[in-house]
Amino acid sequence: MLLRMLRNDITRKKGITAALFIFVLLAALLVSSGSRMIMELTSSIQYLFSESKTPHFVQMHAGELDQAKVNTWAEENAMVQQHQIVEMVNIDGSNLFLGAESEKNSVMDIDFVTQNQGFDYLLNLDSEIIQVNDGEIAVPVYYMQQKKLSVGDQVRIDNGQFERSYTIVDFVRDAQMNPSVVHSKRFIVSAGNLQELKQSIGEMEYLIEFRLTDPGLTSEFTQAYQNAGLPNAGPVVTYGLFQVLNAMTDGVIAAVIILVSLVLILIAMLCIRFTMLATIEEDYREISVMKAIGIAEKDIKRLYLMKYVFMAGFASVLGYIASLGVNRLFVSNIMLYMGKAPATLLHFAIPLLAAGIIFAMVVLFCRTVLRRFRSISAVDALRTGSLGDTQIIRNRLSLSRNRWSSVPVFLGLKEVIQRIKMFRLLLFVFVVSSFIMIVPVNFLNTLQAPSFISYMGVGQSDIRIDLRHTDDVEQRYDNLVAQIQNDKDIKTYSPLVTSQFKIKNAEGSYDNLSVETGDFSIFPLSYVSGNAPTTENEIALSDANSSELRLKTGEQLTLLVNGKDQMMTVSGIYQDVTNGGKTAKALLPYNKDSVLWYVVSLDLNNRGDMATKIAEYEAAFSPAKVTDLQGYLDQTLGGTIQQLKLVTMLALVIGVFISILITALFLQMLVAKDNNDIAVLRSLGFALSKIKFKYVVMSLVILILGVVTGTILSNTLGPLLVSAIMSTFGASNIVFVVNPLQAYVLCPLLLAGTIVLTAWISIQSIKETSISKMIVE
């Protein structure tokens, strides 16, 4: 009997049933997909790090190296389980050809290595340790994706005096250098080929790597290494930072999906409430009759609850199953860069649990809404034909005094004001729909904007020239600055040098701190607090360093300068999402004994000459990296931007779909409530089109209020939410770059157009209403 009643009820109310089913399915789908993406990301990182035996501590070094000293120290240190020194031949991008074009415009440091023997293995796409023969090469997966490379393609090295070609036999997953935000990439060649490269081309660089007996001792080990006087002409990277860098691109996308999912769950609850109210409104006579003939209230509730339990359960299960297919869209980048970890029960249990939570919330809300049965009086319902629960603010607008609008417009506005409690639910939906549409659009525009370079610890300029360590790098740097000074095509320039200083820690010993020195007023950064250093006693810290050192603007630290302690006041905090973001800026003379790199930023008098000027300086100062800032952004954040575009499109579709669905449900409920009033208006001679237009006006009034409020929240609360996500990666104060056409015109018009069409379609049932039908009922 119950199943027959359920089938009849679903058949009779196909529209409302389908709407609720789709909405619960969508909520379960997104929540399951978001949770599955988090599971895949964390497990894939763990699997990659486990299979590759990622080092816990890496000291990058360029220049002369005393390997015996490092080996002796490591063997005597009880914290060290394994250690190795990785030789890398750094090849200038202008000498590397992945196809017809060289990599002269690449921001990446290109290093050729052999496969490691003890740990830090470089894996292929099957997560196996790569082995290559003479004449073969394994290329980073970054280039496979960016350059569309395939096995069998040729990689050529040619500097005019030395030329070799290698055949691609595999692609490299590198736990250290996978992400695009890490500007170093390792290519694998045979030992014989590497020896040939060492003797013929490129500069030597080293990775001094350690695996510890206890990874929890990383901080103590770092301090011990830095105080031992060992090679340190380069940055230090630890296991934890490798994890953050690998999670950055897909972690941001997963966080955005989860955010959209949470918003969707909130709206799902409103949808359930709307649907339940509409159903009860339609069935109030049946409910009153069942009460009148003596059916217990709990039995009536059970009849209704069974329907929604069945529907929510089926929709949640179907949403979970659908997520297994949809999830491939979101995890494809994870699978490419990190591989697929062996599936465990948790990979399926967590998303299923997330879908189960949606089901439980639906049932809970259904039980809450069904409490309204207590207020349904059999006598009143049969007498008035209404639930009688609509709160109406008494007349404050008089039609007789209306001189400023047509009657349908006036009546629509009057209805909204009088029944504000009911309309505030629809208003909330439009606010949230606008929010989830506009925030991803604004975030995407912010990532693509040239000004986003300031979040990477770099001032905004036309061209950036990077000089990495070579034997004559200091002389090349001096020559570069001298040529720029005499170049009439250059409007302004700023030479900057990054070197390592010693900073005194709480225990009284010293840690390394990478400090960029130069004039920071020429190409200024945006600061979270404070400003750029203006004296030699001031220093600006990156947001990540500020958090780690627990220092705020105005507080002091001790820096070892020229062998003496010097008190430095923190002048400001800036944001930097590259390479872990642990940097600092000061006006000190740079430390010549520990220079990491040289950078010159410059602006041209005529930007139309940019390509010519880049080529000129590439030729004159090879192996310098000369890039325009937009190219720098594209190469660093290109993968993140592509993923975010997918999420943005999804958010737009969801926002529009939510608005359509709830507008249709709301108007069905409203028309059901207003059935008698509509019949009276028609009997008074109101044209059907005028009555319908009144409901369209009501929807548009609420939509305008919702879009305005949603836009305001998108530009106030939106940056706070995005900043909370990005703070993990070194940017805790994101300011949106807004495209007014997209945010203030196209998105609202998209919503308005769909809402008007939905409203007009939803109120077609009005034609079935008449005064005679009302009297009969």
Image (tube, helix red, strand yellow):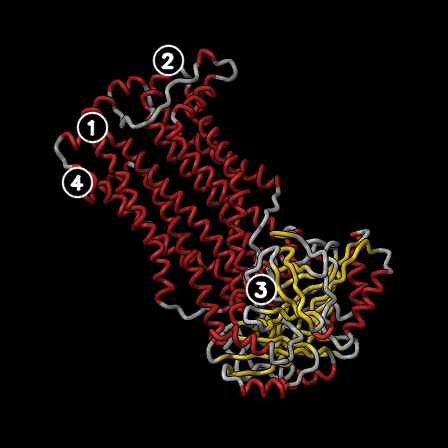
Of residues 487 and 290, which is closer to you in this image? 487
Residue at point 27% right, 41% down?
A: 368
Residue 221 position in % (x across, y down): 53, 77
Q: Nearer the viewer, mark 1 or mark 2?
A: 1
Q: Estimate how packed mark 1 is, as few (under 14), some (14 to 19) or many (20 or more) residues with alpha carbons within 10 Å.
A: some
Report which residue position mark 2 lands on.
684
* Mark 4 and mark 1: Cα distance apart in space: 16 Å
Disc 3 versus disc 1: distance between alpha carbons? 65 Å
Residue 560 location, quadrant: bottom right
Label 4 amino acid?
A: Asp
**On the rendered image, what quadrant is the C terminus found in?**
top left
- The mark lying in front, picked from 4 and 1, is 1
State how many labels appear: 4
Under circle 1, the secondary element is: loop
Q: Residues within 10 Å of mark 4 (few under 14, many from 20)?
A: few
Q: Name the amino acid type tagged 3.
A: Gly
Q: As rendered, which of 7 and 227 lies closer to the eye?
A: 227
Q: Where is residue 29 in the image (x, y as percent from the top left)?
A: 40, 52
**How far apart in space, not on screen, are marks 3 and 2 (Cα)?**
72 Å
Reading the image, the residue beneath label 4 is 299
Instruction: Tell me which numbered mark, 1 or 2, is placed earlier along the sequence.
Output: 1
